[in-house]
Image: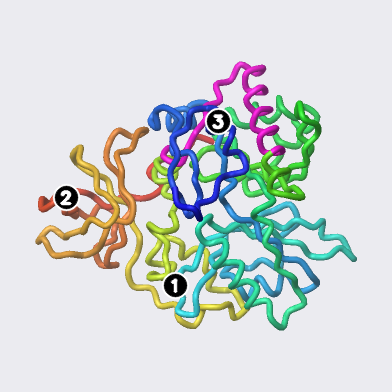
Amino acid sequence: MSDSTRNSPLHPVHEAAGATFTDFGGWNMPLKYGSELAEHKAVRTSAGLFDLSHMGEIRVTGPEAGAMLDHALSSVLSTLKPGRAKYALCLTDAGTILDDTIVYRMDDGEAGSEPDYLVVPNAGNIAAVHTALNQRASGWDAVVEDESSTTALVAVQGPQAERILARAMPEAAAQLAELKYYGHLTLTVPTDAGDVTAVVARTGYTGEDGFELFLPAASTAEAGDRGSAVWNTMLSAADEAGVELTLCGLASRDSLRLEAGMPLYGNELDTGHQPHASGVGFAVPASKEADFVGRSALVGRDVLVGLQGAGRRAARHGYAVLDESGERVGEVTSGAPSPTLGHPIALARVRRDVAAEGTSLQVDLRGRGEPFTVVATPFYRRER
């Protein structure tokens, strides 16, 4: 670990649990606690507990906060309803992806209340997004503040997630049951260390039902205390409910998001490619009236597709994608054996003319062409 690598506020909890750590986006985070395959399967069948405190939290407030975000990001956010969240891209002037974010509307929308948004960027891009939003706020009546260092973020993901949270917060059980995907509530979590205020969002990055709990604090130390208290409360609640809740690290989070066809910054998303070549063209609405940063540069040539392997060998990030004649037509952005489906899967950026479902392609696996077929994503979709 380098001197500049940051620890999560919950780092002592992970050390005590025997986690294996890895550097991710400048953070020293749990890679796994035991078997990454077991952690993956736990989320698909019961529930997993994740520390996501490496993610950023940037608050944007002020009378023109919504209009400023319409200008700064790709999605329409000024009309976002209170208690809802929306996926949005932060683009460069060249129309490439500086980062992908989720934006939460935090105020109640009542007359006289100040518009309040929480922008959540990826761990390695906190400074870049904070700088971009500050620059793009120039001329707008809006204030941009980075709250990342004083916020802990804990997630419970899996089909039993709601049951665990309802046990932890019995007075909020009905509200949790009614909460829609990409909705959020401010709730009180009773813990052995006292009540903790949390923004509880029905969001996640695993392809399963689940919740993310934002725990704002006055300091990093306090964020650690609150995060640890909520972490332990979720484990106790699961035990009381008779539900298996497994500690999960970044390795299982990556295989889960790949099965769900969710893009990852640094793999599918980067400053070298535009949204349509990265599988996130949906976040650039053609009907948006605001002239957002990067809009005029968008073109759209290559596209992101799903690939399913015919054999057992997995494609990996950076491997060449070939057509049946052996001509290079693209590159794999993410690939792995699917623990749930039992065959190799991959996301790849390819030429539009070979992107149709059912197209037979090859992936160059160390000099040998391995057969893959273009398939629809997500590869895995939970039953609802």
Between label 1 and label 3, give the one nearer the viewer. Answer: 1
- Amino acid tagged 2: Leu
Nearer to us in this view, 26 or 123: 26
Q: Is residue 91 magenta?
A: no
Q: Is residue 235 magenta?
A: yes
Q: Which residue is mark 2?
A: 365
What are the residue bounds of the magenta stretch?
A: 225-252
* Distance (Cα) linking label 2 and label 1: 29 Å
> Mark 2 or mark 3, which is nearer the start of the sequence?
3
Q: Which residue is mark 3?
A: 159
* Distance (Cα) linking label 3 and label 2: 36 Å
> Mark 3 or mark 1, which is nearer the start of the sequence?
1
- Amino acid tagged 1: Thr
Left/right of residue 93 with respect to residue 364 in the rendered view: right
* Distance (Cα) linking label 1 and label 3: 35 Å
Residue 197: quadrant of the picture? top right
Q: Which mark is residue 334?
A: none
Position of 15 relative to 180 (above/below): above
